[in-house]
């Protein structure tokens, strides 16, 4: 806490949304042709984008792969490979040798795969689901809206916790904890008709309200959003 | 159709047992066949407050374990023939409770009683869960202070999650708020939460406000439910509350600080 301690580095966990390349083959020539074809349609979007290589859909796992060459291939099309996901254990040493991280416990939105040899997908979800709650959320209760927004029509009381992958809209006082964008969506916001929260979190960044009065907008309608890794709370309108 | 009503709060010492005793007595005074069950195994108090401590032979746990019949264990009140008490065991622990056992006892009581009042222990442990599990309605006793209101809020959540009605997915438990130990002068000076504050926080219907009164302690010690004290404010407030529960339109009383008259001002209280 105190500034006497070193503040040069800080290690923190954060969640990011990353493009994932699902490989169905180790045929490097085939991959290269297809990637070139696909990326030519959206060059700027994927330029220097970090990507994760997902081997979960690999057809033939007996094949060995030269990760160093695969990595160079991706570099050539201006992608920055950072790691492998669902990599068969037998290939771990190869991946580490090529300086690729082994990723575990990812969450992705699976659509029915096409028959092409490799595809690029965004892990963020396209379809927004909304969960609506019309009863008070009481102390000790927890509500989670996966893959979308959470709408609450009654108070969120002190000691209660409301969580969403997307935005949270509370048409009543927020007195408990609200966590939006928990899968890493930094654009998620929290809205309430009366801001009396104990804690607000957006995409893993959080803010406590232990000052007195907690915020300028205390008991007013307010929104919270993330700006430069800080949670900003402003009055609406 | 008999009704099972749980008197609960989460926090201890807010007046659950006092309320259970007075509420059950009030229903019996109105002519309803009423039984009040003490769920506070190991810390039984209800029989003390109801003034039948010395008449306990068998208890709730004996009945659950089929060591005694209900007719043997249930004590009839001396003042009101409609009022009955099923005391808790002082020597067992709450592990004696099973949903099956408690359910059987409550079902059997439904044959002969119109109202079954379950006096819940404090906390959110097994005893409290058992007391609310079979409830049709709940009296939530809270004091005008933050910690009590917070615990009541938690308890409302548990009513919605762990009661039989919630698990079966049928019409939820009907909740009534009782604000106990209310001191108007301290509310006015801002030391205590007001009725409006509490209702804003909990958002359930208010059944009654019981003013703080010395009479409650005296009555408890004497083993007389305070509702029988006609002269006391809290006794009258409990009578109003029972009337409201039965559907009568009775305005709230004792919400303003008592005005001291000239004589009282001169000579003190």
Image (tube, coloured by chain):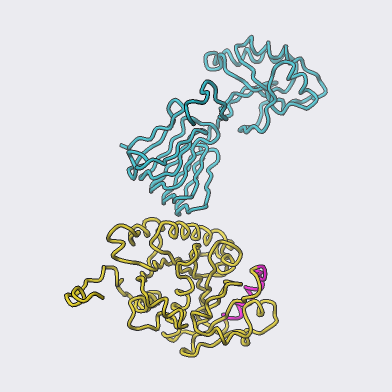
Chain colours: A cyan, B yellow
Of A216 and A162, which appears nearest the observer? A216
- Find residue A46 and report its horizontal and vertical position in percent: 56, 17
Of A205 and B41, which appears nearest the observer? B41
Above or below — where is B114 with respect to B208? below
Residue A57 visible in this rendered orientation of the protein: no
Magenta stretch containing residue B97, yes or no?
A: yes
Residue A47: image quadrant is top right
Compared across the picture, whether A59 is left or right of B176 comes to right
Q: Identify the residue at horizontal 53%, vertical 44% (top origin).
A: A144
Q: Identify the residue at horizontal 37%, vertical 43% (top origin).
A: A195
- Find residue B222 and report its horizontal and vertical position in percent: 45, 83
Above or below — where is A84 with respect to B12? above
Of A64 and A222, which appears nearest the observer? A222
Q: Identify the residue at horizontal 40%, vertical 76% (top origin).
A: B216
- Find residue B198 and report its horizontal and vertical position in percent: 37, 59
Above or below — where is B73 with respect to B154? below
Residue most toward the right?
A62
Quadrant where the image shows the C terminus of chain A: top left
Residue A83 visible in this rendered orientation of the protein: yes
Magenta stretch containing residue B218, yes or no?
A: no
Q: Which stretch appears magenta?
A: B95-110
Compared across the picture, whether B216 is left or right of A91 comes to left
Q: Identify the residue at horizontal 64%, vertical 19% (top origin).
A: A82
- Find residue B25 and report its horizontal and vertical position in percent: 45, 82
Above or below — where is B54 with respect to B191? below
């Amino acid at each position: 806490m105190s500034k006497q301690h070193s503040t040069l580095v800080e290690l923190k966990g954060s969640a990011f949304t990353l493009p994932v390349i699902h490989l169905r083959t180790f045929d490097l020539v085939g991959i290269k042709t297809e990637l070139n074809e696909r990326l030519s349609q959206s060059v700027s979007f994927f330029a220097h984008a970090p990507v994760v290589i997902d081997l979960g859909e690999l057809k033939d796992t007996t094949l060995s792969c030269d990760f160093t060459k695969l990595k160079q291939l991706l570099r050539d099309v201006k992608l920055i490979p950072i790691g492998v996901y669902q990599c068969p254990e037998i290939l771990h040493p190869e991946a580490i040798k090529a300086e690729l991280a082994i990723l575990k416990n990812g969450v992705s939105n699976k659509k029915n795969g096409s028959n092409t040899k490799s595809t690029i997908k965004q892990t963020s979800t396209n379809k927004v689901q909304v969960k609506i709650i019309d009863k008070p959320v009481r102390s000790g209760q927890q509500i989670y809206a996966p893959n979308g927004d959470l709408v609450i029509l009654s108070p969120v009381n002190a000691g209660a916790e409301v969580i969403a992958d997307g935005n949270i809209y509370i048409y009543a006082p927020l007195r408990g904890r609200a966590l939006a964008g928990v899968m890493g969506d930094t654009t998620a916001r929290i809205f309430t008709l009366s801001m009396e929260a104990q804690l607000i979190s957006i995409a893993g960044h959080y803010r406590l309200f232990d000052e007195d009065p907690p915020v300028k907008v205390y008991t007013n309608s307010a929104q919270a959003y993330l700006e430069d890794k800080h949670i900003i709370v402003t009055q609406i309108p | 159709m008999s009704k099972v009503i749980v008197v609960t709060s989460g926090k201890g010492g807010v007046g659950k047992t006092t309320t259970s005793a007075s509420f059950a007595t009030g229903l019996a005074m109105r002519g309803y066949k009423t039984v009040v069950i003490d769920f506070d195994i190991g810390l039984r108090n209800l029989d003390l407050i109801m003034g039948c401590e010395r008449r306990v032979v068998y208890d709730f746990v004996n009945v659950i374990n089929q060591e005694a019949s209900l007719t043997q264990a249930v004590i009839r009140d001396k003042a009101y023939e409609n009022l009955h008490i099923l005391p808790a065991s002082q020597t067992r622990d709450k592990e004696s409770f099973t949903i099956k056992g408690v359910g059987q006892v409550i079902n059997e009581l439904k044959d002969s009683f119109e109202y079954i009042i379950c006096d819940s222990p404090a906390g959110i442990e097994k005893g409290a869960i058992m007391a609310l599990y079979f409830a049709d309605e709940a009296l939530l006793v809270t004091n005008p202070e933050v910690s009590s209101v917070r615990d009541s809020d938690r308890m409302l959540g548990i009513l919605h999650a762990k009661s039989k009605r919630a698990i079966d997915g049928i019409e939820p438990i009907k909740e009534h708020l009782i604000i106990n130990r209310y001191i108007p002068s301290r509310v006015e000076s801002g030391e205590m939460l007001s009725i409006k504050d509490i209702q804003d926080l909990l958002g359930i219907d208010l059944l009654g406000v019981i003013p703080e009164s010395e009479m409650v302690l005296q009555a408890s010690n004497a083993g007389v439910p305070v509702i029988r004290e006609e002269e006391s404010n809290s006794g009258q407030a409990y009578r109003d509350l029972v009337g409201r529960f039965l559907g009568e339109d009775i305005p709230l009383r004792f919400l303003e600080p008592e005005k001291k008259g000239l004589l009282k001002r001169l000579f003190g209280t």
